Amino acid sequence: MTSPDGSVYSGAWRMNVRHGLGRKEYCNSDLYDGSWKEGLQEGHGSYSWTNGNRYIGNWKNGKMCGRGVMRWANGDLFDGFWLNGFRHGSGVYKFVDGCLYYGAWSHGLKDGKGVFYPAGSKHPSLKKWCRSLQHDDTGKFVLSRSSSINVEELRSLSTVTPSLSVKTSVSGTVSEPPPSDFTCHGPSSKSARSSGSGQREGQDKNRVVYEREYMQGVLIRETITSSVDRSHKIRPPNLPKQVRDRSFMTFLKGEHNYYLMLNLQLGIRYTVGKITPVPRREVRASDFGKKARTMMYFPRDGSNFTPPHKSIDFSWKDYCPMVFRNLRAMFKLDPADYMMSICGDDGLTEICSPGKSGSIFYLSHDDRFVIKTLKKSELEVLLKMLPKYYRHVGDHENTLITKFFGVHRIKLKLGKKVRFVVMGNMFCTELKIHRRYDLKGSTQGRITEKTKIQEKTTLKDLDLAYEFHMDKLLREALFKQIYLDCAFLESLHIIDYSLLLGVHFRAPEQLNDILEHPNEMSDQDSVSSVDVGMAQELSIPPKGLLLVTHEPNSVNTAPGPHIRGSTLRAFSVGEKEVDLILPGTARLRVQLGVNMPAQAHHKLDEDKEESATIELFEVYDVVVYMGIIDILQEYNAKKKVEHKCKSLRYDPMTISVTEPKVYSKRFVDFLHKVFPEET
């Protein structure tokens, strides 16, 4: 097929559109050879630009997406993961002069922790990073037995050892974009050289490496270590873990089991499907009683009420179904969305517990819901507090307390019982959460060992080195709700709750055009402008956040599991309801605990000069997310007070420190220090 613009396509078709294996030469001499779907590149393929750049890897909806290798004309090479044409996820960037950077990217910008190896230093093994694309016994790609791409080409591009193969799912169809959409977002963008070149001199390259941390392309922390020490410790961030087959017996010993996830999905699908057709009504006292339970047996071969399944036989119990049905409606949660998020084909993901409770945590595939296993005592506390909790969330739509969507129990054939609760994930947001803190207002033992801190580690009170300054009215609304929620927890004699705080650090304005217009400048102009922008940014605090008058039609109003309540008013905009504008990001709705803008003031240590860590900023614009969690620990008998003191690791004080009122006072006093009032 020869198009009017001079481009030529030869290959497979379906219903008059390119579909299957094919080769297209564009009018500007670019060349794509690989798999197509509904007129767009999808699957495996190779794209060569006229300027000498070349990409071999996975595609989706006409853009680089998944695992792939890019080599630029200047000799630089990136082997890692892509999303919508940008580097996104873990990867390794190899400079032509021999320098190497392991780390994580987000939408084309370095984002997270990584390690930079100068030229000449000892590099770790690349086996974990380099995986060959799908190929058959002949050495050619599975996508095409006549394709000109083979494994030797891939090896010559990446110069690394192939390991495990990666499968990429394909879905979606959109119209064909112009060839200009296929331009690579590599060294021609400003961020590609923002690290690596400025600090390659002045050190013994054979002995030192740099542990670096970036936030949206900005270097915020750097530590010098030995390349010998790092060579055997390097582990790529965000690298998918291998899935091991586990038997039913391992589950009986307390480990996660595949059958448990299937049982959860089957039970929740049954629960939601059974209660949804029932007309909604006001809850009664009996809806909270011991008889407000729904039970069902799920045999493997199915029954008149349950479908056959591939799991083991189990019994299902649903607690207070009408109450939680109304709670889901209060939280503006559509039953179909709820069921598809948890019970869809993508399944659930097991996540590590941030605490010492020993509970198993699952995350839905779209990050909207967290499922946590409960102890019997925690289940009893939750059911006991449910009537007051129902009234509290009904009276206070802006409550920061955890959103509960359902409580269930699974009983397996051999008598093993597993209780769990479905909650909303506060960190389901459009923005990346760079820091997570669990704050209790205590100092005894509330610190994380530096060697155990990873990118997504939940830190503690003493790890928090920032004060957050926010708009006057936003702060007033925040503490008003915190007082209400703490009073509610006091009335239930609840202790040991904490504030889960998530922080998104905003990149400077000088780097925003990387996300929006990455190809308007030449390589030299891009690199030089980034160097100037970063030099200016180190001395001038960035101002990348903007509050504007709320416009409902301009905001994505689709409610998330953590989003509920009215839009907040800001003092800085004349006490009007406001939205948050971030350059390069859509308009965000500001609500209590969600999308709240602030300025983080870093607390500098007195012995900073003696530290091996280099801090590159003092003040930063941030977006914070927060909520009150761990509300299922009840203060009951005085004979358990001393035990509580030890388990909660309080400061050496009087025994009365564990009384609910004293606990809430210390909790709020600490938050006043974290969010100080403007003077």
Image (cartoon, rainbow, N blue to C red):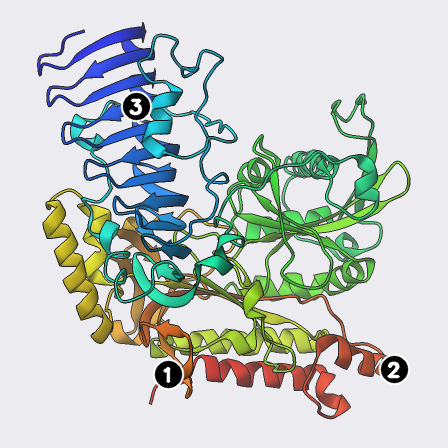
Image quarter where the N terminus lies is top left
Closer to the camera in the image, 259 or 390: 259
The amino acid marked with disc number 1 is Glu
Q: Nearer the viewer, mark 2 or mark 3?
A: 3
Q: Earlier in the sequence, mark 2 or mark 3?
A: 3
The amino acid marked with disc number 3 is Ser
- Residue 576 % position (x, y): 29, 69
Q: Which residue is mark 3?
A: 46
Query: Can you see residue 296?
Result: no
Image quarter where the C terminus lies is bottom left
Closer to the camera in the image, 53 or 124: 124
Please report the residue visible at 66 percent of the width from the left and 52 percent of the height from the top: 282
Closer to the camera in the image, 387 or 366: 366
Query: Can you see residue 510?
Result: yes
Label placed on residue 609:
1
Mark 3 in CB contact with mark 1 (< 8 angstroms): no
- Residue 21 % position (x, y): 34, 11
Residue at the right extreme? 414
Please report the residue visible at 35 percent of the width from the left and 34 percent of the height from the top: 158
Q: Earlier in the sequence, mark 3 or mark 1?
A: 3
Mark 2: which secondary structure?
Answer: helix
For the residues marked 3 and 1, what is the alpha-carbon distance in whole angstroms?
50 Å
Mark 3: which secondary structure?
Answer: strand
Using a 10 Å C-alpha cutoff, classify the residue at mark 3 as few (fewer than 14 neighbours), some (14 to 19) or many (20 or more). many
Closer to the camera in the image, 72 or 254: 72
Q: Which residue is mark 2?
A: 639
Please give left or right for residue 610 compared with residue 585 in the image.
Answer: right
Using a 10 Å C-alpha cutoff, classify the residue at mark 2 as few (fewer than 14 neighbours), some (14 to 19) or many (20 or more). few
The amino acid marked with disc number 2 is Lys
Label placed on residue 92:
none
Mark 1: which secondary structure?
Answer: helix
Image quarter for residue 341?
top right
